[in-house]
């Protein structure tokens, strides 16, 4: 999917920063691709970019307006359609990771046609996937899993890829969500794949490779989340990970969007191993990534130290600090080198 850059990030009128996580992810990992953000009245998210109108963004060279917001169900609010049409009329392409195809909205389809602009539905793949087979294949894979949604699985995977490459390992990030695809330029939005083919899509995403090559697979959802556990399980079986990292947000009491309590890290480790053994009996946990954004430095350090001690595993905040302790364990365990 060849999406023209740079981007104007459209945040709409989302209620909080998590609802703008697509835009935030692009800014954090590809800031050079962004000229500014566009926010509607009532928007409570801010990615730290200049607030621009569509005309101002076009004058600064923007080529594509990326709808950087997410919501339950991936719907496109009617109140955003006029802004998308305005962008197309101004000469911008439009990209979105929502579940609704842009061309299915007549006003948007007509504006794109009449202006010769491109519509990118990042969540949808034109590929046809087979069902998963579960056959053991060469190469090494690491998957990020979570106690909940939106706890840092994508950021942890990207940080792992970067640190593993610094350590001299062959490693490639494998995007499984719309933001990851926009960041990496490749991948498949697993949650938009028909249920029967989720594990097969994951097998396609990280196929057989060299014995010492790592696919760093972005996790989705949580095995404990009543809304998304099905996607999580299919990805786990298809990714066939040798190793996994548990991602956690310590200040939450219930999972995002539902009233179910947050599972413990130990529960996630145990269930991931039980379920993951179906396609890789050697699966093991190699670390814990804690999102300490809501803690001050002292509380964050204490949380990481206590969590590491409780589980006898390296515990890091991949954004605030570094994932090097986890990578050191990976090197020592799978490559026979002292950390």
Image (cartoon, rainbow, N blue to C red):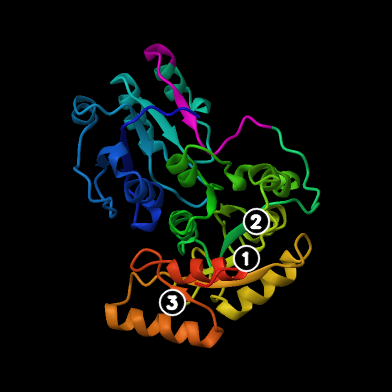
Q: Which x, y percent locates residue 214? A: 59, 53
Query: Which residue position is annotated with label 3?
Result: 250
Query: Which residue position is annotated with label 2?
Result: 140
Would you say residue 33 is visible in this rendering? yes
Question: Mark 3 vs mark 1: which is more N-terminal?
Answer: 3
Q: Which mark is residue 334?
A: 1
Q: Is residue 184 magenta?
A: no
Q: Secondary structure at mark 3?
A: loop
Q: Is residue 124 magenta?
A: yes
Question: Mark 1 vs mark 2: which is more N-terminal?
Answer: 2
User: Residue placed at 56% from the left, 48% from the top?
Assistant: 176
Gap in angstroms between the C-alphas marked 3 and 1: 29 Å
Whether residue 332 is situated above or below residue 205 in the rendered picture:
below
Q: Do tag 2 and tag 3 residues touch (Cβ < 8 Å)? A: no
Read off the magenta span: 113-127
Whether residue 101 is situated above or below residue 23 in the rendered picture:
above
User: Residue placed at 43% from the left, 54% from the top?
Assistant: 162
Judged left or right of residue 235, residue 161 is: left
Gap in angstroms between the C-alphas marked 1 and 2: 9 Å
């Amino acid at each position: 999917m060849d999406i023209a850059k740079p981007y104007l990030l459209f945040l709409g009128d989302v209620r909080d920063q998590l609802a703008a996580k697509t835009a935030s992810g692009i800014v954090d990992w590809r800031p050079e691709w962004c000229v500014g953000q566009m926010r509607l009245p009532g928007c409570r998210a801010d990615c730290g970019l200049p607030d621009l109108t569509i005309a101002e963004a076009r004058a600064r060279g923007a080529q594509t307006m990326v709808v950087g917001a997410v919501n339950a169900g991936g719907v496109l609010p009617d109140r955003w359609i006029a802004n998308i049409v305005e962008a197309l009329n101004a000469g911008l392409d439009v990209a979105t990771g929502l579940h609704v195809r842009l061309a299915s909205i007549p006003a948007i389809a007509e504006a794109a046609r009449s202006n010769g602009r491109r519509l990118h539905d990042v969540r949808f793949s034109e590929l046809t996937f087979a069902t998963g087979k579960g056959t053991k294949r060469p190469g090494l894979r690491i998957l990020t899993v979570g106690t909940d949604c939106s706890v840092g699985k994508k950021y942890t995977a990207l940080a792992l890829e970067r640190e593993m490459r610094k350590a001299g390992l062959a490693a490639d990030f494998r995007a499984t969500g719309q933001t990851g695809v926009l960041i990496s330029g490749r991948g498949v939005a697993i949650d938009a794949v028909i249920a029967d083919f989720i594990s097969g899509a994951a097998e396609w995403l990280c196929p057989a490779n060299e014995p010492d090559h790592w696919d760093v697979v972005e996790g989705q959802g949580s095995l404990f989340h009543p809304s998304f556990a099905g996607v999580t399980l299919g990805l786990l079986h298809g990714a066939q990970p040798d190793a996994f990292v548990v991602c956690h947000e310590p200040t939450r009491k219930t999972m995002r969007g539902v009233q179910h309590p947050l599972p413990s890290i130990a529960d996630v480790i145990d269930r991931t191993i039980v379920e993951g053994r179906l396609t890789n009996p050697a699966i093991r946990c190699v670390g814990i990534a804690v999102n300490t954004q809501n803690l001050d430095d002292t509380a964050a350090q204490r949380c990481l130290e206590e969590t590491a001690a409780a589980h006898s595993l390296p515990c890091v905040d991949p954004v605030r600090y570094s994932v090097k302790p986890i990578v050191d364990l990976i090197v020592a365990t799978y490559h026979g080198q002292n950390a």
